Image: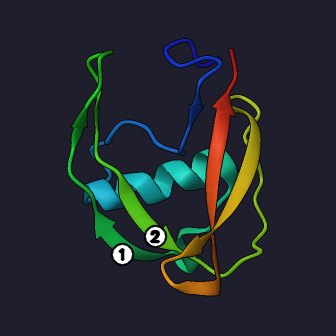
């Protein structure tokens, strides 16, 4: 059970581990562990600026894209459900990206 963030809507993520070569590798590993997103199909676009949270956590958002639809497998120990929200990108109305968010288990 995830006690620190139960019931919150969030993106996949977690703590850096010594086996991770970079924070990008952390993001890819955590996405694989939480929602089964295969790191091999993700094209990482880069990192955004760190964000200090009121809870004391520092978040480093990592942005990437992959072909959609793609198969996801939710880890029930960490995630209650995954939902998707599509939106237009810039002026290209036909271009759609999908935001994957999770609701953590409480």
Secondary-structure class at tag 1: strand
Instruction: Identify the residue at horizontal 75%, vertical 47% (top origin).
Output: 83
Element at label 2: strand
Residue 11: assigned label: none
Q: CA distance from mark 1 to mark 2?
A: 5 Å
Rendered location of residue 34, percent (x, y): 62, 44
> Label for residue 64?
2
Front residue (pair 78, 20): 78
Quadrant in the rendering for residue 22: bottom left
Q: Position of residue 99 (x, y in %)?
A: 61, 58
Residue 45 numbered tag: 1
Instruction: Give the quarter of the figure containing the N terminus.
Output: top right
**Residue 84: quarter of image:** bottom right
Whether pointer 1 and pointer 2 mark residues with C-beta atoms closer than 8 Å, the reply is yes
- Residue drawn 36% across the image and 75% down it: 45
Can residue 78 be seen in this snapshot? Answer: no
Name the N-terminal-most of marks 1 and 2: 1
Q: Is residue 35 visible?
A: yes
The quadrant holding residue 12 is top right
Residue pictured at 32% horizontal, 50% vertical: 19
In the rendered view of the protein, which quadrant contains the C terminus? top right
**Residue 103: x, y in percent?**
67, 32
- Residue 61 appears left or right of 106: left
- Crowd band around label 1 with a 10 angstrom C-alpha radius: few (<14), some (14–19), many (20+): few
- Please give the name of the residue rendered at 70% of the width and 56% of the height, measured from the top-left corner: 85
Q: Is residue 35 above or below residue 45?
A: above
On screen, 66 above or below 28? below
């Amino acid at each position: 059970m995830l006690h620190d963030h139960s019931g919150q809507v969030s993106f996949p993520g977690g703590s850096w581990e010594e086996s991770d070569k970079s924070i990008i590798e952390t993001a890819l590993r955590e996405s694989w562990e939480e929602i089964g997103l295969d790191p091999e199909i993700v094209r990482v676009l880069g990192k955004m600026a760190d964000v200090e949270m009121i809870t004391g956590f520092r978040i480093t958002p990592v942005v990437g894209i992959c072909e959609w639809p793609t198969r996801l497998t939710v880890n029930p120990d960490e995630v209650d459900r995954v939902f998707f929200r599509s939106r237009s990108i810039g002026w290209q109305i036909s271009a759609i990206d999908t935001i994957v968010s999770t609701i953590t288990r409480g």
